[in-house]
Image (cartoon, grey):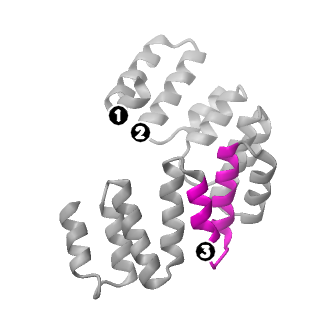
Amino acid sequence: ADELLKLVDENSDVLDETALLHAATLVKDENDKIKLYNKAIDKYDSDVARYNLAATYFNNDELSKAESALSKIEDKDADYENALGAIALRKGNYDEALKHFKNSGTNAAQTNIGILDILQGNYSKAVQDIKDTKGCCSNRTLAYILNGQLDKAEAEVSCNHGKANYLRAIIAARKGNASDVKKYLDMVQKQDKALYE
């Protein structure tokens, strides 16, 4: 990472916006990401860098910094609205979050509406709101589990990562299938130790 940052610093005059943004995806240290996004903002007035900077702060639970980065975005598009909704959701401001998600209208925002339903205990509404969304199956599977639709949950879960196998273990437990619970939890232990613990 240090070598990459040194390379970027030495060649900052010739690197374009795309190269700077790509370099930020290659570093693992969050502070290094922040430096590279700020470099792209300073040099190219990059809205993409501002959005990615906000996402980095959001992932670190630095919500005021995420809001500050978003406030400087000029192109306040659907992704911007979804990001504001995610921050409001994290803060527990559910009405504000819903307003932003509806303003966004993206697939990600619709998934977030389903998450909002789940957090408020509206499981049948969550199923309706999430059922046609694209992408990772985990939220749809969770909505079906919480709504007591175990067969649909089992049919829905199609991914093969730690979270999906954890949900498979929950489905098996609710169906009383102890051997499958053990099988899926063993898979989770190999795939996602933090989730297993």
Q: Where 2 falls versus 124 (above or below)?
A: below
Q: What residue type is labelled 2?
A: His
Q: Are marks 2 and 1 in contact (CB under 8 Å)?
A: yes
The residue that label 2 is drawn on is 161
Q: Where 135 falls versus 177 (above or below)?
A: below
The residue that label 1 is drawn on is 191
Mark 2 surroundings within 10 Å by alpha-carbon count, few (fewer than 14), some (14 through 19), many (20 or more): some
Q: How far apart are marks 3 and 1 (CA)?
A: 37 Å
Taken as a whole, is the magenta stretch helix, strand or loop?
Answer: helix
Among the two numbered marks 2 and 3 on one chain, the one whose residue lies closer to the N terminus: 3
- Residue 139 in the image: state x and y as whole percent: 61, 41
Q: Where 131 falls versus 20 (above or below)?
A: above
118 horizontally vs 174: left or right: right
Q: Give the range drawn in magenta.
A: 64-91
| Quarter of the figure with the N terminus | bottom left
Q: Nearer the viewer, mark 3 or mark 1?
A: 3
- Residue 46 in the image: state x and y as whole percent: 49, 79
